[in-house]
Image (tube, rainbow, N blue to C red):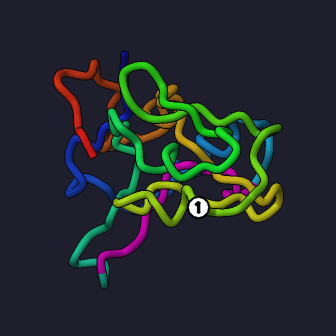
Amino acid sequence: MKRLAVVDVNLCVGCQGCLFACARRFGDAGLSRSAIHVKSAGGIERGFIVTVCRACLDPPCAKVCPTDALKPRPGGGVILNPQKCIGCGNCKEACTINAVFWDEDTNKPAICTHCGYCVDFCPYGVLKLEEREGGISV
């Protein structure tokens, strides 16, 4: 199973091409549905912080979902069933790396599907879709 990974954050220039690509998976403009976040590390000379789902093998976000809207994905990460989600936000609070973002329009989490669509829109090679070896157990 493949997962999205940050290859080298030092290559990021903060163009946000990955964010727009992620959000456009749904055919929408804007960034509200993006499952990736890029922010300044505190000034242009300090670079950027790129936050993406690490595809936990035992995802804490799924454990706290009271309606089972988030189910563990084979190989790590989760799959969201938006029809079951009640917008409680427990998943966002439970993510240990703050990689569950919130879509204010739908009042539901923006969950990375590890599709790799964003990778093609990063001209600097910051992101890649990689085959999972071992895994992160959180």
In the displayed image of the protein, which residue is found farthest to the front? Answer: 66
Question: Residue 5 appears in which quarter of the rendering?
Answer: top left
Whether residue 97 is in magenta: the answer is no
Does residue 110 lie above or below 81 as drawn? below
Check the picture and name the quadrant holding the N terminus.
top left
Q: Is residue 67 above or below residue 94?
A: above
Task: Residue at 52%, 55% (x, y): give it.
Answer: 100
Give x and y (percent) for residue 89.
64, 63
Query: Horizontally, is 72 left or right of 105 in the view?
Result: left
Q: Residue at x 47, y 28 (%)?
A: 116
User: Which residue sits furthest bottom?
Assistant: 42
Specify the principal SS of the magenta part. Answer: loop
Disc 1 residue type?
Asn
- Per the image, label 1 sits on a secondary structure element best described as helix
Q: Position of residue 61 (x, y in %)?
A: 49, 50
Q: Is residue 40 magenta?
A: yes
* Region of the chain picked out in magenta, as a range: 30-41
Of 66 and 104, which appears nearest the observer? 66
Horizontally, residue 58 falls left or right of residue 121, namely: left
| Circle 1 residue | 90
Q: Residues within 10 Å of mark 1 (few under 14, many from 20)?
A: some
Q: Residue at x 67, y 57 (%)?
A: 31
Looking at this view, is 49 or 91 the one in front?
91
